[in-house]
Image: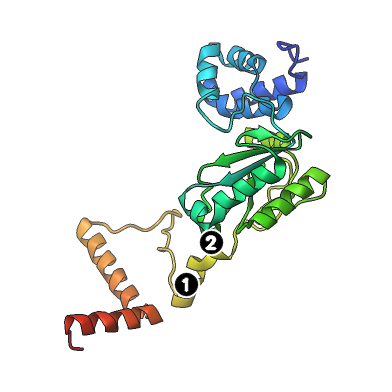
Amino acid sequence: MTEQISEGLSETTVAELRELAARYPQARSALLPMLHIVQSEQGRVTAEGIEVCGQILGLTEAEVSAVATFYTMYKRRPMGTHHVGVCTNTLCAVMGGDEIFERLCGHLDVGNDETTEDGRITLERVECNAACDFAPVMMVNWEFFDNQTPESAIDVVDKLRSGETVQSTRGATITSWREAERVIGGFEDGLVDEGPAAGPASLVGLEIADQRGWAAPPLDASGTEARPESTTEAVAEADTSRAESETVAEQTDTDVEGGADLQESEGVDD
């Protein structure tokens, strides 16, 4: 039977914390996922969770607290059933992220990092979600909701509050913030392959490569990329590859019109 070192954390959770610590050559490397597991049970990083993580890893409470207070994904106040994060970094902001956030604040009657009275939604203004090609982006329990508008965002939170099934645009069916925290901590929920992993904007580069016959460098017999034997050969390969790309690259209307305008303005003959 697992030794009980916590009156609040369940025996199962303590066992999972120990399992995480055993996955790493240096146990203290497990602290980040362990804190997510604490949140998955207690809805935040509690003083008790900090103490238990410290005991398992041989760290002081001050060392654990330093980590828990550094990263914004670790919460010190109770979270709602769902965490809704609206990206208001530069691109999302100019594409409408600021308006989405303000409309949600008014609709939910909360401010930044606050939870609705029914405990269903915690709203947060977040930094870049690394999905700029789908701006403006909102995340629910760290699942993507792309190309949002104030109206679509309000529809999502209303469905979450009413308990309806909600599907992310590029990912799994939404569960709860605590369940998502357990997955982030390292314990799969079986939904990893649910939903598309990439949207049209992410696949444009692949489509262009297919149209132009571009491919990754071939692998050698060992399965690694074949590399030139000398710096001179590497430079020659790069020059040849660039020249070939420039030869087969198709001109867009902008290229043609822009080039013509530039030639006329500079008096350049064809």
Residue appearing at x 18%, y 88% in the figure:
269
Q: Amino acid at mark 2?
A: Ser
Where is residue 209 shown, x and y percent of the image?
46, 71
Q: How is the image coloured?
A: rainbow
- Residue 24 appears in the picture as rendered: no
Few, some or many residues within 10 Å of mark 2 (<14, 14–19, 20+): some
Which quadrant of the figure has residue 23?
A: top right
- Could you say where residue 154 lies in the image, as x and y percent from the top left? 71, 51
The residue indicated by pointer 2 is: 202
Label 2 – label 1 distance at C-alpha: 12 Å
Q: Residue at x 63, y 51 (%)?
A: 144
Horizontal arrangement in the rendering, residue 126 relative to residue 116 (left or right): left
Which of 181 and 245 lies nearest the eye of the viewer?
A: 181
Identify the image quadrant of residue 179: top right
Label 2 sits on a secondary structure element that is helix
**Is residue 80 shown above or below 62?**
below
Q: Nearer the viewer, residue 78 or 95?
A: 95
User: Which residue sits furthest right?
Assistant: 163
> Which of the two labelled residues, at mark 2 and mark 1, occupies the earlier sequence position?
2
Res 189 → quadrant: top right
On screen, residue 99 versus residue 161, left or right, reads: left
The residue at the point 67 percent across, 27 percent down is 39
Q: Residues within 10 Å of mark 1 (few under 14, many from 20)?
A: few
Q: Secondary structure at mark 1?
A: helix
Which residue extends farthest bottom?
270
- Residue beneath label 1, please? 208
